[in-house]
Amino acid sequence: MKITDMEIKPVVMPKEDKEWRFALGGESTARGFLVKIFSDAGVIGLGSAGAAAHHGVSVSGVQA
């Protein structure tokens, strides 16, 4: 089985409690990407990757 194609879509999801914070800060939305991988056998894989500044991960870094 070989990967034949891949889709990466940015997503911005509102958080249920926009005021929730912790020691390093907080954000009212969660940003990241949905990933869809296609194979020559017809198998489709789905995944996600989040980006959070307080974890030291930028959106552009995750996308790269």
Image (spheres, grey):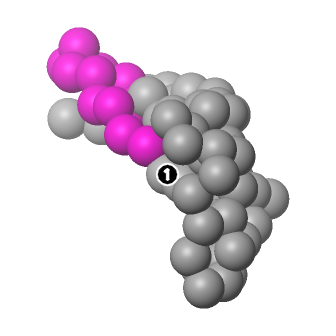
> Percent x, y for residue 29?
67, 43
- How many numbered marks does the figure carry? 1
The quarter of the rendered structure image containing the N terminus is: top left
Magenta-highlighted residues: 37-48
Q: Is residue 39 visible?
A: no
Predominant SS of the magenta segment? strand
Residue 43 forms part of the magenta stretch: yes
Q: Residue at x 51, y 35 (%)?
A: 16
Residue 38 forms part of the magenta stretch: yes
> Percent x, y for residue 36?
44, 28
Q: Residue at x 64, y 44 (%)?
A: 18
Q: Residues within 10 Å of mark 1 (few under 14, many from 20)?
A: some
In the picture shown, does residue 2 fall above or below 39? below
Q: Residue furthest top?
A: 42
Q: Residue at x 21, y 21 (%)?
A: 43
For label 1, the SS is: strand
Residue 3 is left or right of residue 10, and the answer is: left
Q: Quadrant of residue 26?
A: bottom right
Identify which residue, 21 or 12, lies in the foreground: 21
In the rendered structure, which amino acid carries the disc numbered 1?
Ala
Q: Residue at x 57, y 57 (%)?
A: 20
> Percent x, y for residue 11?
64, 32
Residue 2 is left or right of residue 57, and the answer is: left
Q: Residue furthest right?
A: 60
**Residue at the spot of label 1:** 49
> Percent x, y for residue 60?
79, 59
Identify which residue, 29 or 38, lies in the foreground: 29
Identify which residue, 38 or 36, lies in the foreground: 36
